[in-house]
Amino acid sequence: MAEIQAAARSPLAHLAAPPSSAALTLREMPFRGMVGLRLDLGDKGARDAVEAALVATLPEANRATACAAGRLLWLGPDEFLIVTEPGGETALVTALAASLRGRRGAVVDISDSRTTIALSGKRARDLLAKGSGLDLHPRQFAPGQCAQSFLAKVKIALLQLDDLPSYHIIVERSVAEYLFLWLVDAAREFSTGPP
């Protein structure tokens, strides 16, 4: 029997990113490691053990923080997402699972089911507003904030990185192509005319 070798392929590899400008830059950040963490926050021992393994304090609601592995996003009262550099998820899952041994919590590698779309530029907020009900005004949504929401009817996790503004849009790979093409199409108006 012939041996089958699987090559990693990102869900957007076959699509060309639109030209970048000061108004907008849009591209995929493939193969990021992503680890889902569910934790009983009432169990102080579990919380302390996870924070020690991450070398970080768990973020508060709708916030993201840096941790030794990468970025730690709050997704819900007992749900977090850790985003690592490509390949960083395996060691992280092992460390977190060991820290939770005997405690209430779950750690799952979800890297293969998601991809990240990076969006930045002075019109990025306007582009997101075309398909999302989130209030992205700088007074309401600032660097270090994150939220789960819908963009163009697709469930996403959105993280704002800086004041440019720059965002990471984390999306399931099964709908990533649709969302990317929607973003490209919705961005057309910003590539012509004054910013």
Image (tube, rainbow, N blue to C red):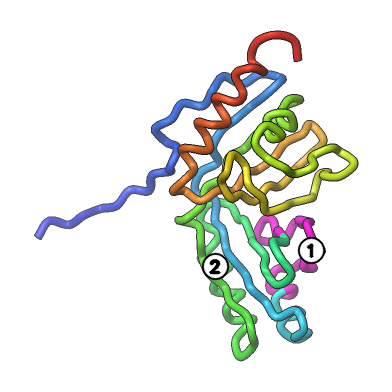
Residue at the extreme left of the image, as rendered: 1
Which of these two is toward me, 174 or 91? 174
Q: What residue lies at 59% left-to-right and 81% top-to-bottom?
A: 98
Query: What are the residue bounds of the magenta stretch?
Result: 51-73
Position of 150 with respect to 16 (left or right) is right
Element on which disc 2 rests? helix
Left or right side of 29 for 1? left
The amino acid beneath tag 1 is Pro
> What is the x, y in percent for residue 190?
67, 18
Name above or below for residue 46 compared with residue 10: below
Residue 56 at what x, y percent from top left?
Answer: 77, 66
Q: On the picture, is 137 further left or further right than 45?
A: right
Q: Residue at x 71, y 30 (%)?
A: 124
Which of the labelled discs sits on residue 123, or is there none?
Answer: none
**Residue labelled with disc 1:** 59
Q: Is residue 183 above or below residue 70?
A: above
**Does the magenta run of residues contain 185?**
no
Q: Which mark sits nearer the N-terminus, 2 or 1?
A: 1
Q: Residue extending furthest bottom? A: 102
Quadrant of the rendered image containing residue 13: top left
User: Which quadrant holds the N terminus?
Assistant: bottom left
**Residue 73 picture location, percent across and down:** 71, 58
- In the depicted view, which residue is nearer to us: 22 or 153? 153
Determine the secondary structure under disc 1: loop
Q: Which amino acid lies under the numbered mark 2 shown in the image of this protein?
A: Ala
Residue drawn where x is 59% and y is 66% of the image = 36
Q: Residues within 10 Å of mark 2 (few under 14, many from 20)?
A: few
For the residues marked 2 and 1, what is the alpha-carbon distance in whole angstroms? 21 Å
Name the quadrant containing residue 130: top right
**Residue where numbered disc 2 is placed:** 91
